[in-house]
Image (tube, rainbow, N blue to C red):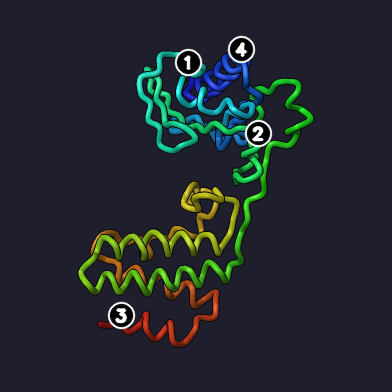
């Protein structure tokens, strides 16, 4: 079996397992194991939500027997809602458990229903919420402030903190401003295949540790070409670039 086949089979087997448990309502596959299974490859993993009846959340977070379709060799509760896991055969996954009433406050991309109890059909027929997206101008302004504060930290000698703001936060905000069909939670995902025209910018804007000055100059040039930059902010960023 290919990795793709294994992942799809594992997801279906988890679905059959939760169907046998009291208090479960729906298993929702997300990401590449969700509605975009054509993207599954050797580097993919499992990403899913388990929807349960009110009052049942703790049971499915504290006891992972419903996931034991294969030996589970690693588990780490990384949030109050779920775990990161790995099976004996190296299949990795991340999941969260939500009670039905919690879904109104959670943002997530459209998913694929792996299994659902019949009575859940009426209550939750369309398993998705819209992701709120700010305007391109908003993200460009965020990127400019990332550059300014990041350069301040760089000049102070905080090169790692400067790197994080300039070459990570600012770059991500530029990618959000430019849009595209990438991951709404992480714009760096699949950017090379979905926005190949951005690769030259990434080469210039992500130079590595200790090179945030060069990177910031490249990021500022791109923003200026697409967005009206406040003269005072531009002056202060350029002052830090030249110091």
The local crowd at label 4, few if under 14, some if 14 to 19, many if 20 or more residues have their Cα within 10 Å, is: few
Q: Nearer the viewer, mark 2 or mark 1?
A: 2
N-term-proximal mark, 2 vs 1: 1
Q: Nearer the viewer, mark 4 or mark 2?
A: 2
Residue closer to the observer: 27 or 174:
27
Q: Is residue 81 left or right of residue 166?
A: right
Q: How far across and down, in percent of the image, does residue 100 sit?
A: 65, 33
Q: Quick one: SS at disc 2? A: helix
**Which residue is located at x 43 percent, y 62 percent?**
171
Q: Nearer the viewer, mark 3 or mark 1?
A: 1
The local crowd at label 2, few if under 14, some if 14 to 19, many if 20 or more residues have their Cα within 10 Å, is: some
- Please identify the residue farthest to the left as the structure is shown: 157
N-term-proximal mark, 4 vs 1: 4
The local crowd at label 3, few if under 14, some if 14 to 19, many if 20 or more residues have their Cα within 10 Å, is: some
In the picture, the disc for residue 65 is: 1
N-term-proximal mark, 4 vs 3: 4
* C-alpha distance separating marks 2 and 3: 50 Å
* C-alpha distance separating marks 3 and 1: 56 Å
N-term-proximal mark, 2 vs 3: 2
Task: Provide the residue designation for mark 3.
Answer: 240
* C-alpha distance separating marks 4 and 3: 62 Å
Q: Quick one: SS at disc 4? A: loop
**Which residue is located at x 47 percent, y 87 percent?**
231
N-term-proximal mark, 4 vs 2: 4
Q: Quadrant of the C terminus?
A: bottom left
Q: Is residue 116 above or below residue 110?
A: above
Residue closer to the observer: 225 or 231:
231
Task: Provide the residue designation for mark 2.
Answer: 100
Task: Provide the residue designation for mark 4.
Answer: 20
């Amino acid at each position: 079996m290919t990795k793709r086949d294994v992942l799809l089979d594992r997801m279906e087997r988890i679905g059959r397992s939760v169907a046998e448990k009291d208090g479960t309502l729906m298993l929702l596959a997300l990401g590449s194991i969700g509605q975009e299974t054509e993207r599954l490859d050797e580097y993919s993993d499992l990403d899913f939500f388990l929807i349960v009846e009110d009052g049942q959340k703790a049971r499915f977070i504290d006891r992972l027997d419903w996931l034991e379709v294969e030996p589970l060799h690693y588990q780490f509760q990384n949030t109050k809602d779920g775990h990161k896991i790995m099976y004996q055969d190296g299949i990795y996954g991340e999941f969260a458990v939500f009670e039905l009433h919690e879904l109104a406050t959670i943002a997530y991309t459209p998913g694929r229903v792996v299994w659902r109890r019949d009575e859940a059909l009426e209550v939750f027929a369309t398993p998705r919420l819209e992701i709120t997206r700010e305007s391109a101008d908003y993200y460009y302004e965020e990127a400019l402030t990332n550059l300014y504060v990041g350069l301040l930290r760089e000049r102070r000698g905080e090169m790692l903190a400067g790197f994080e703001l300039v070459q990570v936060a600012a770059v991500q905000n530029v990618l959000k401003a430019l849009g595209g069909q990438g991951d709404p939670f992480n714009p760096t995902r699949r950017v090379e295949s979905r926005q190949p025209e951005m690769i030259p910018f990434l080469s210039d804007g992500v130079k590595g540790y200790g090179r945030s000055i060069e990177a910031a100059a490249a990021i500022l040039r791109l923003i200026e070409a697409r967005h009206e930059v406040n003269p005072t902010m531009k002056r202060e960023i350029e002052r830090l670039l030249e110091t």
